[in-house]
């Protein structure tokens, strides 16, 4: 058997289900399972933890009637005991209840216009296979009827195509904790450069996927946080032309930067003036347009108060992202940036540039 623990997460879960011991008489401990699924013995400690998380994921998805633990999952934590695991031999992947199938159908509808078409088609096929096995029962249920009354409209721009081999290399590098070497073309440029990165994960912004990580700067004890963060970068997957996993392990310091931490530090997207900053945004905004922002506020601390007869003053603490500036330009017919001054100047310059495109005709 190949080393299942080296596979990308989706493939790994499917392979684990396929090769997992069936029946109580064949139940195995976590140590026995990692020996079976990680025969090379590489990274045993981290991959044992990964396998434990995979078992929890399968249990969450399929339930205790499928993924069985001794002692039972219902006992919660089992300190001092060595649990064993097996799959109920009577279970089949088609044994989804209505709630599970409804969840996957809603996920399919929600992501239809945001994920690459190949991924969406795979999801559709899997749902169809499950649904066929108890079509009448599910279609007659209340949940089964809902899918005909929900739709997600697409973005103006379609989701791009992603190369499956490049995706596989990226997934392998992330999960095996190895540096990734890839060929990349910067936006607006024609030259392709070879880069090497300690990958942290993938970031979805609208329907574009970005690879985030750190340039390979080693593991010197003198590396400061400032220098580490100075080597952080995001790369659009659409501009990666080739990728391969290297033998260089990812240093321990990279693990201290989770995706949540990087997001809070403002490192996962473009910011105005290339400097992540929490700003106090003040907008003079049309009174009617405020209804929209009461329903979908810019921040938890947003305040809307009177400004003049036709307008309101909106104040909110927000990150100075490029997406914020794009939104302000789109709202410029109904609003005016009061503060910060540099955001105001950026919006004015871009509006002038846009107007010149029409004025020159």
Image: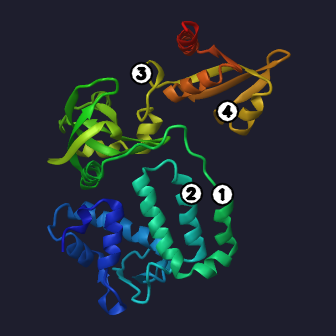
Secondary structure at badge 4 equals loop
- Distance of label 2 from label 1 (alpha carbons): 8 Å
Q: Nearer the viewer, mark 2 or mark 4?
A: 2
* Labels 4 & 1 near each other (Cβ < 8 A): no
Which badge, 2 or 4, is on the more N-terminal residue?
A: 2
* Labels 3 & 2 near each other (Cβ < 8 A): no
Q: Relative to 110, is 203 on the left or the right?
A: left
- The answer, for residue 98, to whether it is visible in the render is yes
Residue at the disc numbered 4: 301
Residue at the disc numbered 1: 150
Q: Residue at x 38, y 71 (%)?
A: 55
Vertical position of residue 150 compared to residue 284: above or below? below
Q: Residues within 10 Å of mark 3 (few under 14, many from 20)?
A: few
- Distance of label 3 from label 2 (alpha carbons): 35 Å
Secondary structure at badge 2 equals helix
Q: Relative to 130, is 316 on the left or the right?
A: right
Q: Relative to 40, is 310 on the left or the right?
A: right
Which badge, 3 or 2, is on the more N-terminal residue?
A: 2
List the single residue furthest toward the top: 360
How was this image coloured? rainbow
Q: Nearer the viewer, mark 3 or mark 4?
A: 3
Q: Residues within 10 Å of mark 1 (few under 14, many from 20)?
A: few
Residue at the disc numbered 2: 109
Residue at the disc numbered 3: 274
> Which numbered tag is attached to residue 283?
none
- The answer, for residue 222, to whether it is visible in the render is no
Q: Residues within 10 Å of mark 2 (few under 14, many from 20)?
A: some
Vertical position of residue 207 compared to residue 38: above or below? above
């Amino acid at each position: 058997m190949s080393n299942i623990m080296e596979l990308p997460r989706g493939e790994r879960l499917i392979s684990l289900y396929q090769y997992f011991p069936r029946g109580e008489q064949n139940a195995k401990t976590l140590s026995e399972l990692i020996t079976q699924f990680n025969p090379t013995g590489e990274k045993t400690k981290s991959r044992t933890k990964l396998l434990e998380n995979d078992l929890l994921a399968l249990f969450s998805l399929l339930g205790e009637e499928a993924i069985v633990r001794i002692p039972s999952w219902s006992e919660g934590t089992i300190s001092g005991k060595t649990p064993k695991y097996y799959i109920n031999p009577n279970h089949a992947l088609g044994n989804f209840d209505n709630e599970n199938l409804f969840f996957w159908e809603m996920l399919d509808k929600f992501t239809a216009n945001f994920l690459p078409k190949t991924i969406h088609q795979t999801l559709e096929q899997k749902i169809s296979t499950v649904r066929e096995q108890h079509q009448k029962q599910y279609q007659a249920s209340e949940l089964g009827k809902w899918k005909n009354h929900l739709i997600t409209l697409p973005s103006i721009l379609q989701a791009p195509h992603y190369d499956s081999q490049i995706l596989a290399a990226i997934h392998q590098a992330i999960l095996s904790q190895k540096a990734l070497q890839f060929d990349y073309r910067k936006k607006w440029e024609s030259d392709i450069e070879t880069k090497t990165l300690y990958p942290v994960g993938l970031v979805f912004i609208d329907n574009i996927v970005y690879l985030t990580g750190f340039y390979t700067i080693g593991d010197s004890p003198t590396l400061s946080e400032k220098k580490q963060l100075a080597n952080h970068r995001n790369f659009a997957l659409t501009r990666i032309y080739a990728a391969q996993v290297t033998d260089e392990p990812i240093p321990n310091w990279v693990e201290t930067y989770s995706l949540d931490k990087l997001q809070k530090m403002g490192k996962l997207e473009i910011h105005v003036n290339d400097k992540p900053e929490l700003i106090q945004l003040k907008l003079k905004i049309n009174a009617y347009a405020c209804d929209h922002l009461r329903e979908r506020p810019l921040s938890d601390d947003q305040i809307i108060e009177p400004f003049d007869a036709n307008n309101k003053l909106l104040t909110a603490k927000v990150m100075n992202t490029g997406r914020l500036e794009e939104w302000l330009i789109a709202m410029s017919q109904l609003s005016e940036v009061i503060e910060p001054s540099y955001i105001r100047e950026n919006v004015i310059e871009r509006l002038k540039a846009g107007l010149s495109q029409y004025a020159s005709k």
